[in-house]
Amino acid sequence: MKNSFKNLSFQELKLKRDELTRKYLDLRFQMVIGHVDNPLQKRVMRRQIARLNTLITQQEKDAKPALAAEKKA
């Protein structure tokens, strides 16, 4: 699962991040209630969201120089 995000487009990364964030919030609420099968799932989801944020930031930084070069031309 670690490397499966690298082939996604920018929009797909954002959608996946939003989806995982919603699932993470639901998981947090379930942990408060006490109905969680795997408590380590919270850590895994948090790390996946961090990976997605890193990839999104990298793609944004890669796009900025390309846009600046187009504006100069």
Image: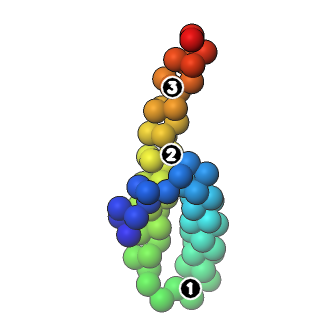
Residue type at numbered disc 3: Ala
Q: Quadrant of the N terminus?
A: bottom left
x and y percentages locating residue 69 in the rendered image:
52, 17
| Residue located beneath label 2 in the image | 56
64 sits to left or right of 3? right
Q: Distance between the residues labelled 3 and 2?
A: 16 Å
For the question of whether residue 61 can be seen, the reply is yes
40 sits to left or right of 33? left
Q: Toward the viewer: 26 or 67?
A: 67
Disc 1 crowd, CA 10 A, few/some/many (<14, 14-19, 20+): few
Vertical side of 5 occupied by 34: above or below: below
x and y percentages locating residue 29 in the rendered image:
63, 75
Residue type at numbered disc 1: Gly
| Residue located beneath label 1 in the image | 34
| Residue located beneath label 3 in the image | 66
Q: Distance between the residues labelled 2 and 1?
A: 33 Å
CB within 8 Å, label 3 to label 2? no
Vertical side of 61 occupied by 33: above or below: below
What label does residue 71 carry, if any?
none
x and y percentages locating residue 11 in the rendered image:
61, 51
Of pointers 1 and 3, the one earlier in the residue sequence: 1
Residue drawn where x is 57% and y is 75% of the image: 27
Q: Is mark 3 on a helix, strand or loop?
A: helix
